[in-house]
């Protein structure tokens, strides 16, 4: 082993720089130990522990350079490296690294609470997994934000507690499982581009709300807010917590002159509470509870128009004359759960038995393979069919396959399906459908949900589908009725 | 009436990218959270705690109590007197630990303290007494004190005494011995014990006279100045030490000391850049102690290590320790020492980070960022990350480089578990073998287990009914 010890007078460097250099020297091939340090008492004792004799004269202003290596070559190599490092004033690992400036902006927020501190925000849009979405939503509520929870599979317990937190904090809690909202004209989730206007909507249903937005837009009625409350809000457990809060909020908005409540069939006592509360508001409220004995969404839209004194025309239809009825079954292939529900309610009145993966009360449920049983309706947006894949409004693959199957099935008299446009949906849902139906004999009726300004182009989508042979309705209820008229014997 | 439901001024999104994009297409500003699932296994406890209606207000209460706390140096006196420490009883850093599990440096410091107190005349004899159960010890924190590294306090040692006048509470810490072979790093050679005897015979009494003559020194204010002078208050205390000496000097000079002793006292304090660490620590103890005991609060009020275990305490559950294995720091080594020589993390000094300085204030101490081969921008980023783990800020300790933003304050157990990001601690490294002393310095984090066990207890406390 060879040792080299130098004492360099007046060559001050700060201790941390020298520790970095010492470490780099020790890492070099052939170097057994190295100490580059100011000659303080501590460092002189470290030098002795390394087996070096103490230098005769050294003050804390002198630099010690002590290297023990396998041979002279190793030491010379280390010394050459040392000179370069001393000139650079830094060790190898820090050389050339780093940027400049405060750098704070480079840290991305990892929680909503952290994001709130980055700047001006008033709303959080949460689509994290349902098992943990309550954590993020509680964070947003604590930060004073209005919250939309898009996630599904949030437990009822979490939902109730989140809504209680929101009430305490005075913020709006939309969802969980809220697919659609419009706040001050800004669409969130799957939302259509609406024109500004006097309507405020409280919706416990995503695609139901989209149908209403589209029908009102078609009647040139604008919507200021559409507050989604989640499909369970009007259940007994959740007791309309968000619906009641949203009603109060909308009632206090000067720009809102009519309020609509839209929901799948609510729990009776909750419906009574909401109806009772609605009567205490200054703003007139149109109640649109979907159910066997209730009006459909198109009829609700018409009530809104009447309330506003706007002339109502039936929503548009595109396409040729209806073909003569065919023997066989109606097959409904939906991306929107509420649109599917609405169509089934209308169909069951005419057909009696309607099978589905989301069956109406007393109706048959499809097996796991989803094979059609007579008149059949499938909601491709149901949780069981979206595990591990995107919603069918984004990824149409599964439904297109089924459409191809039904078109080839001799027992299928007519296919009814929905096409939902707007923010978040597939940029061009029509083309794939047109490809499947071209040349097919089975008629197709499309319920097209879209507004004038939706990015996909509602009018052009309708015309392309019609040109390919489909019959297209802006009203889901009207589409369903026309499809029913094509089933012989119904 | 103004509209409560205006177009969002900005939308924060967590989750699906597509949803953020469609908001952006409508010309509404979005801030995207870089979301990741919480630490596995903590989901349901986290939800329980996050949904606790007391949480938000409780955390604000904890932080406002912390920022309201004062810390004045009011006295310097013997541990036997200040802490009522009886003969044969010692204090140590970190959570409680017995002899069998004690690490090298803690054993070394206890051996040294036993000899210092005259209870044994050799390390062997001391070890026998310690292992045999005839001597006792407990955490410094249990008595409202703090100790750096091994943190061993014996009855004859002199302590600084700090007073929080807002909450009328006191905290104590021993006098800093300097670097290298010192008791707190587990060294117990004759030179170590001689220095401690001189500190008890000369340094302590001198500082007592100066402190009593001077009157209270506002340590919170000194820290406010030091963080604007390049000190982060844990691995760099140079400016703080000099400012403290400046406060003491006139009264030291007129204290009637022997001139040689006076010179030695001044030389000792001014020659030890870390002298002030032992004032930062009790000041931080008073601050974090003020935030303790708020029902529903998830703010961390203690982080401390005994060389074997890392322990934290959380506001809502008072003095309960949540522990996990202490980690070895990542950093630079003195002389020929290397990672194999280093003991796992040790010391109560992480109280500095708990109160928002040290690693949390790295942005203000560019001079020491290279301890881990880091750059100045890394330091800035570290402080920024720590803001995201904290529920508040301390406006009294403003960081010039961050536009005088206050230091991050109030580590939130929930934020740690939700982000998987751990508090950054600056630390010294002790040798693994008893008697070695300091081997290096660097950066370390607590083990995640401290936080995962804490959240279970917090969830139990939060569960309704």
Image: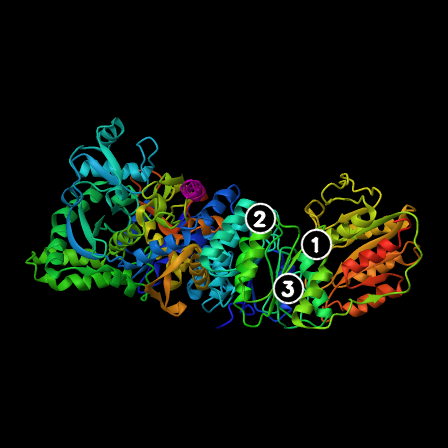
What residue range appears in magenta? B450-465
Q: Nearer the viewer, residue B382 or B56?
A: B56
Question: Which residue was labeled with disc 2?
Answer: A269
Q: Is residue A124 left or right of residue B257?
A: right
Q: Secondary structure at mark 2?
A: helix
| Residue B118 forms part of the magenta stretch | no
For disc 1, the chain is: A
Q: Could you confirm whether marks 2 and 1 are on the same chain?
A: yes
What number is the disc on residue B21? 3
Question: Which residue was labeled with disc 1?
Answer: A294
For disc 2, the chain is: A
Q: Could you confirm whether marks 3 and 1 are on the same chain?
A: no
Residue A319 horizontal/vertical position (percent): 87, 65
Residue A170 horizontal/vertical position (percent): 47, 60
| Residue at point 17%, 33% (across, down) | B119
**Quick one: which residue is furthest to the left in this view?**
B256
Q: Nearer the viewer, residue B177 or B346?
A: B346
Q: From where the camera sits, is residue A227 visible?
A: yes
| Alpha-carbon span between mark 3 and mark 1 | 37 Å
Q: Secondary structure at mark 1?
A: loop
Q: Secondary structure at mark 3?
A: helix
């Amino acid at each position: 082993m060879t040792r080299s010890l130098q004492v360099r007078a007046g060559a001050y460097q700060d201790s941390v720089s020298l520790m970095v250099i010492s470490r780099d020297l020790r890492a070099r091939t052939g170097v057994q130990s190295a100490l580059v340090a100011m000659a303080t008492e501590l460092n002189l004792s470290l030098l002795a522990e390394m087996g070096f004799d103490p230098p005769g004269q050294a003050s804390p202003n002198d630099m010690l350079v002590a290297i023990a290596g396998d041979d002279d070559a190793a030491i010379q190599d280390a010394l050459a490296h040392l000179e370069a490092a001393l000139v650079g004033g830094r060790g190898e690992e820090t050389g050339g690294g780093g940027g400049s400036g405060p750098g704070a902006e480079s840290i991305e927020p990892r929680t909503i609470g952290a994001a709130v501190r980055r700047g001006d925000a008033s709303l959080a849009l949460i689509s994290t997994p349902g098992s943990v979405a309550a954590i993020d939503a509680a964070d947003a509520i604590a930060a004073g934000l209005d919250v939309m929870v898009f996630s599904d599979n949030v437990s009822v317990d979490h939902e109730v507690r989140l809504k209680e937190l929101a009430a305490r904090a005075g913020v709006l809690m939309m969802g969980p499982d809220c697919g659609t909202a419009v706040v001050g004209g800004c669409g969130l989730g799957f939302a259509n581009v609406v024109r500004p206007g006097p309507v405020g909507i409280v919706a416990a249903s995503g695609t139901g709300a989209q149908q209403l937005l589209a029908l009102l837009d078609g009647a040139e009625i604008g919507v200021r807010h559409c507050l989604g409350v989640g499909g369970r809000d009007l259940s007994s457990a959740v007791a309309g917590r968000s619906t009641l809060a949203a009603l109060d909020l909308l009632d206090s908005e000067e720009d809102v002159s009519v309020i609509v409540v839209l929901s799948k069939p609510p729990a009776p006592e909750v419906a009574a509470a909401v109806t009772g509360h609605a009567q205490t508001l200054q703003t007139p409220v149109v109640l649109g509870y979907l159910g066997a004995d209730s009006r459909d969404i198109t009829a609700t839209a018409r009530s809104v128009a009447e309330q506003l004194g706007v002339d109502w025309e039936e929503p548009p239809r595109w396409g040729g004359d209806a073909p003569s009825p065919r023997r066989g079954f109606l097959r409904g292939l939906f991306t929107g759960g509420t649109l599917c529900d609405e169509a089934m309610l209308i169909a069951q009145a005419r057909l009696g038995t309607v099978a589905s993966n989301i069956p109406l009360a007393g109706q048959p449920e499809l097996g796991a393979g989803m094979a059609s049983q007579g008149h059949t309706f499938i909601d491709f947006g149901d949780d069981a069919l979206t595990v591990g894949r995107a919603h069918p409004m984004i990824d149409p693959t599964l439904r297109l396959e089924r459409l191809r199957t039904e078109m080839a099935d001799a027992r299928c008299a007519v296919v009814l399906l929905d096409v939902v446009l707007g923010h978040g949906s597939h940029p061009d849902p029509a083309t794939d459908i047109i490809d499947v139906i071209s040349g097919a004999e089975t008629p197709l009726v499309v319920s097209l949900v879209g507004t004038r300004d939706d990015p996909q182009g509602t009018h052009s989508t309708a015309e392309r589908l019609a040109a390919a042979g489909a019959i297209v309705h802006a009203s889901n209820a009207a589409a369903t009725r026309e499809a029913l008229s094509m089933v012989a014997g119904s | 009436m103004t509209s409560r439901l205006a177009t969002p001024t900005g939308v924060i999104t967590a989750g699906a990218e597509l949803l953020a994009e469609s908001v952006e297409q409508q010309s509404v500003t979005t801030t995207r959270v870089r979301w990741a699932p919480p630490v596995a296994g903590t989901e349901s406890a986290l939800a329980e705690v996050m949904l606790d209606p007391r949480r938000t207000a409780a955390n604000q209460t904890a932080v406002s109590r912390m920022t309201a706390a004062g810390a004045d140096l009011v006295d310097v006196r013997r541990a036997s007197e200040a802490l009522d420490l009886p003969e044969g009883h010692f204090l140590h850093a970190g959570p409680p630990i017995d002899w069998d599990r004690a690490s090298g440096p803690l054993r070394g410091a206890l051996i040294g303290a036993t000899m210092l107190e005259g209870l044994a005349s050799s390390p062997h004899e001391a070890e026998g007494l310690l292992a045999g159960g005839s001597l006792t010890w407990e955490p410094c924190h249990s008595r409202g004190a703090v100790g750096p590294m091994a943190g061993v306090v014996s009855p004859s040692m002199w302590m600084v005494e700090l007073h929080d006048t807002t909450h009328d509470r006191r905290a104590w810490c021993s006098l800093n011995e300097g670097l290298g072979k010192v008791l707190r790093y587990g060294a117990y050679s004759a030179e170590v014990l001689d220095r401690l005897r001189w500190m008890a015979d000369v340094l302590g009494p001198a500082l007592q006279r100066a402190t009593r003559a001077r009157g209270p020194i506002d340590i919170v204010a000194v820290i406010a100045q030091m963080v604007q002078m390049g000190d982060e208050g844990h691995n760099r205390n140079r400016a703080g030490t000099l400012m403290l000496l400046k406060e003491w000097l006139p009264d030291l000079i007129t204290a009637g000391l022997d001139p040689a002793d006076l010179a030695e006292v001044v030389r000792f304090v001014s020659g030890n850049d870390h002298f002030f660490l032992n004032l930062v620590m009790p000041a931080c103890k008073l601050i974090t102690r003020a935030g303790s005991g708020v029902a529903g609060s998830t703010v961390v009020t203690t982080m401390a290590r005994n060389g074997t275990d890392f322990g934290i305490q959380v506001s809502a559950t008072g003095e309960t320790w949540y522990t996990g294995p202490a980690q070895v720091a990542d950093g630079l080594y003195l002389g020929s020492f290397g990672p194999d020589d280093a003991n796992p993390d040790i010391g109560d000094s992480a109280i500095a980070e708990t109160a928002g300085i040290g690693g949390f204030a790295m942005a203000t101490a560019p001079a020491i960022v290279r301890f881990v081969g880091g750059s100045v921008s890394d330091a800035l980023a570290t402080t920024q990350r720590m803001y995201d783990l904290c529920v508040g800020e301390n406006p009294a300790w403003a960081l010039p480089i961050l536009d005088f933003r206050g230091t991050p304050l109030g580590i939130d157990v929930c934020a740690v578990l939700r982000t998987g990001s751990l508090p950054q601690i600056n630390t010294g490294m002790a040798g693994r073998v008893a008697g070695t002393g300091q081997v290096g310095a660097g950066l370390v984090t607590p083990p995640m287990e401290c936080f995962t066990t804490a959240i279970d207890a917090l969830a139990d406390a939060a569960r309704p009914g």
